[in-house]
Image (cartoon, rainbow, N blue to C red):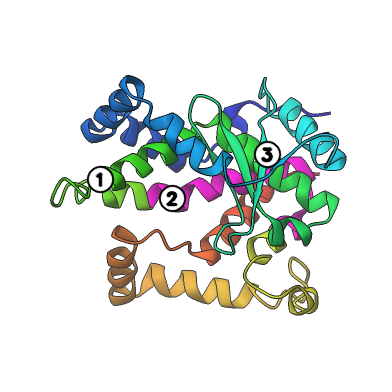
Amino acid sequence: MDIYQIKDFQHPRDSQLVNDILSNNLAINILQTFHQTNIEDAYSYLYQSSCPQLTEKTSPKLFELLAKACEMFELKEIPKVYVTRDYTETVSVRGMKDPFLVFSSEYLRKLDDETLFGILAGQVAAIRCNHHIILCITWGIYFAAGFIPYGTMAIDPIINDWKRCRYFTYDRAFCLATKNHSLSLRQVLINVVPQNILDRMRIGTDQDAFINQAKKFLNTMNNNKTQKLIKKAISAYSYKIWLPERYEEINKFFDERRIL
C-alpha cells in the first residue's frame, strides 16, 4: 500500500490559507479562548450527544476502510465516527484536540465501498492538514461575531476562500486513495445530481456530460472581465463551491501525478 505525506496531497492554496488564518489575530484569540475555557468540549458535545456513534461492531466495513485510510495518510489515531439525519450535512470533520467524523445517514447509504474509501481518505487527509482546527476556529469566530459588530469582515474573505480550496486537498486525497479518475470526478457531483441521472452522465469518460459546461464556466470566468469581477465579489462573502474548478483541479492532478 502506498503511503502519502502532507506534501503529496495538500493543495498549495489550501496550505497558504491555513497559515494565513492561523496567524490572524482574531483566530489566535479564538484559539486562546478555547484553551482557557471548555468551549471546545461544548462544541464537540453538540455533535456527540445527539448523533449516534458508529463502531467496528455496527459498521465493520467502514472501520476497515477508515483504518486503511489512516495508515495510507499517516494518521496515528483512528477518529470516532458519528451519524446524523441532517440533510444539509454530507460528511465533515469536527472537534479540535480529538477530531471526529460526522456522516449524513442519507449520504452514507448511497456510497459503494470504493467511493466510501475515497471519501474517508479525504477526511483523514483533512485532519492531517488541520482542517478540523480551522473549522473549529470559524465556528468560534462566527459565535463571537454576535458580540463584535463587523468583527468578521476582515477575515471573512480568507475563510470563505479556504472553505473552497480545502476541497482541492480533499479531492487530491480521494484521487490518491482510489486511483480512479472517473470516480474522482463523479464524487464531486454525487450529492448534487440524483444517482440515476448521474449514471447516465458518463462522468470522466469521452462522453462526459459535464465537462463542456465546466470548460465554458472556467473560460468565461478567466477571460470575461465583468464575470470575473462578479465571481470575485461573490467569492469574498460566500463559500460557494465552484464545481467546475474542482473538476479542473482533479484533471490537472491526474495529469501531473500520472496516477495509475
Q: Is residue 131 visible?
A: no
Q: Secondary structure at mark 2?
A: helix
How many angstroms separate mark 1 from mark 3 (CA)?
30 Å
Q: Main secondary structure of the magenta part?
A: helix
Q: Is residue 155 visible?
A: yes
Tag 2 residue: 163
User: Any mark on residue 204, and which?
Assistant: none
Tag 3 residue: 81
Residue name at image x 76 percent, y 73 percent: 195
Q: Are marks 1 and 3 in contact (CB under 8 Å)?
A: no
User: Any mark on residue 155, and which?
Assistant: 1
Q: Secondary structure at mark 3?
A: strand
Mark toward the start of the polypeptide (1 vs 2):
1
Residue type at mark 1? Ile
Residue 213 image position (x, y, % from top left): 57, 77
The question of residue 103 being in magenta is answered with no
Residue type at mark 2? Lys
Residue name at image x 80 percent, y 42 percent: 62
> Against 139, is 106 above or below?
below
Q: Quadrant of residue 249?
A: bottom right
Mark toward the start of the polypeptide (1 vs 3):
3
Residue 166 image position (x, y, % from top left): 50, 46
Q: Which residues are magenta?
A: 161-184
Q: Quadrant of the N terminus?
A: top right
Q: Quadrant of residue 31?
A: top left
